[in-house]
Image (cartoon, rainbow, N blue to C red):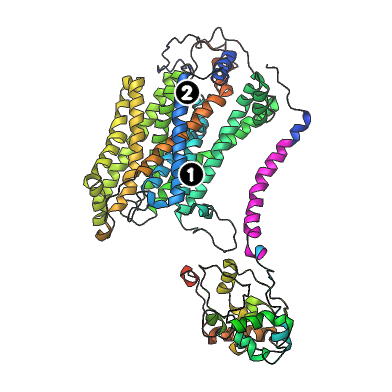
Amino acid sequence: MGRYHYVFPRWTNLLLPGAIFMAMVAPLYVVYVVAYGFSPMTTDVGYAPDQVIEYSHKLHAGELGIDCRYCHNTVEYSAKASIPPTQTCMNCHTQIHKDSPKLEALRQSYEKGTPVTWTRVHDLPGYAYFNHSAHVNRGVSCVSCHGRVDRMDVVQQMQPLSMGWCLDCHRNPTENLRDPSEVTNLGWSFKGTEQELVDYHDFWQDHNNINPSQDCSTCHR
Amino acid sequence: MSTIVIDNTFEDPTRRAPLVLNHHDFGSVTDEVCWVNESPKPPLAWYITFVISLSLLGMLGGLIMYLFATGVGVWGNQNPVMWGFPIVNFVFWVGIGHAGTLISAILFLFRQKWRTAINRFAEAMTIFAVMCAGLFPGIHVGRVWFAYWLFPIPNQMNMWPQFRSPLLWDVFAVGTYATVSVLFWYLGMVPDLATLRDRSKTKLRAILYGIFSLGWRGSMRHWHRYERGYLLLAALATPLVLSVHSVVSFDFAVAQLPGWHTTIFPPYFVAGAIFSGFAMVMTLAIPARQIWGLKNFITMRHLENMNKIILLTGSMVGYAYSTEFFVAWYSGAMYESFAFVNRAFGQHWWAYWIMVSCNVLTPQVFWFKAARRSIPIMFIACLLVNVGMWFERFVIVISLEQDFLPSSWAYYKPTWVDIGMLVGSFGLFMTMFMLFIRFLPVIAIAEVKAIMPEANPHRGHDHHDDDSDHATMEARS
């Protein structure tokens, strides 16, 4: 026998079950971290950057009741909903609060002809092709993806906008469907019994022939 | 210890051939095997091999960096041969890895006692071969940063691997095989690691071997659980010998391509895998027993037994080659016939004939007892078998180059990166193997003792057993 027969103190016996436990749990932990920690559900939801102008959707869309499409006017015709040009704002603000210090950046933009440098909140990756008109015209409301913007002072991302989240709806769109005339009515809710609601969803799915594609090339072109 | 050459290759039903030669007792077995790890310096041959292997491993690392930085265009993979060298190498190395489990599990369950001298060795070789194999699909995916997509990990994209694809089955088959092989190898090594721990002369060795021997004391209860665990793992590993290469063969057989889409593939691949695995065990064992003086444990009888298995599996492979041709003709399918005629007489005819001559003709020398017992002949034969089995996978993958659509026909040419990576994978394999020889017990010390005459409780009452009169019952650890 060598000189080092007993190099380990007795308590090291406890390390072995610990090591086996770690070896079994560590992979699960890593998978959990990758699946949830790196998900946009964790990293992106709640993103609410400060803007150069303290524009309140709550005031404009909520209290004043301006329709979404007054500003985001291409949403029904194009892939992009479009951020309104300064001129759209000035339709009113040449008359209303025209000297407000809060609108300084807006007036600067108007005089110089340079756009307001809004910070984008809902930003899909460049390799994902999303078409607003395809959704809005088939009765998918703004609220399904953007939440109650008419109640937000500062716009914040409400949904993960991850691929899995898109697919969830593409696989089971029924509950996000409504009468296309109600898509910009963010506070709308169905009034009726549960069965009537089911029939309502089914009706619009049938009526608009909603059968969303799940091919890779639907979004990655 | 003097090495008197004793012939233990006789076949005499009245006498059991000794598997450990030169009057070893339990103590001298331990001393001799541990000397490989405990000698102050390894032999010169170890240094030479290690330096060469390490340089090749470095080259492999450099080439992989080059591949990552540039893209898969550095390989010769080109339409229609999209698989090329990486998949050839993958199948080659997975095949090599099959001898380990066969020796450790199947021969164990069949009570083939001669396996004890070579099983540690073969299992180590298996694990390192599976490491080499695992490398190639990983870098072949193109976007290596997405290589983890091979595994079904829940993710924000709701995206899963294609569960109907044999490529995914491969991930599980090879992953299971690697896990079970490592467990089996490690479990068998625990008593021997404890022996090394108890003999260590420096504190560092005592601590490291101590950690890995998991507090083994060699008590009756330890042995009892060890034997149970080993038996269970052997039973678990046995189906893997057949399943892993069957699944690898599905990569080809499930594809609807002439020359690939055949039911013969699973058994044919398994036979080929065992064939190449044994050839690789021999390729490593012959020099190793020479250099480290392990001839008393890996005896001529062991080598001869392995040569017999090589003869058997080589002939099975040859039979499969001829069956493929027969079926191609008998099926009357013109595409199938074309694929096989093309293999033998098409643009890569030379690869086909290298394969046939190395795999089918070479092992036939082992019909002769003199060849089975001649070190130079068996060494050369095993090297040729290694070459032939690599070419077998090459021939199969390359049959892609003339597919259904003549406009896409091409001549596959590997690039220097392809060849460098093949050579480099041997660097990885040999580096791991050299480290294994130097730092871990190369022969299952405890198991070898169990097959010595001294281990037989009836020894002394058995008048046939005349080879062990002056051995002592000195069991260690």
Whether label 1 touches label 2, CB < 8 Å = no
Give coordinates of residue B144: x percent, y percent: 49, 52
Give coordinates of residue B123: x percent, y percent: 51, 32
Amino acid type at circle 1 is: Gly
Q: Tell me the chain of label 2.
A: B
Mark 1 or 2, nearer chain start = 2
- Residue A207, which numbered label? none
Label 2 Cα crowd, 10 Å radius (few <14 / some 14-19 / many 20+): some
Amino acid type at circle 2 is: Trp
Main SS of the magenta segment? helix
| Residue farthest toward the top in the current orientation of the protein | B470
Q: Nearer the viewer, mark 1 or mark 2?
A: 2
Secondary structure category for the residue under label 2 = helix
- Do the residues at discs 1 and 2 belong to one chain? yes
Give coordinates of residue B69: x percent, y percent: 46, 50
Left or right relative to A179: residue A63: right
Identify the image quadrant of residue A179: bottom right
Q: CA distance from mark 1 to mark 2?
A: 26 Å
Left or right relative to B412: residue B170: right
Front residue of B342/B438: it is: B438
Give coordinates of residue B442: x percent, y percent: 53, 25
Secondary structure category for the residue under label 1 = helix
Does the magenta portion include A34? yes
Please tell me which residue is depicted at 57% across the width and 80% down the height of the picture: A82
Q: Is residue A201 visible?
A: no
Please tell me which residue is depicted at 49% across the width and 59% down the height of the picture: B162
Is residue B470 shown above or below B434? above
Q: Which residue is mark 1?
A: B134
Q: Magenta span covers which residues? A: A15-42
Q: Which residue is mark 2?
A: B46
Front residue of B271/A206: it is: A206
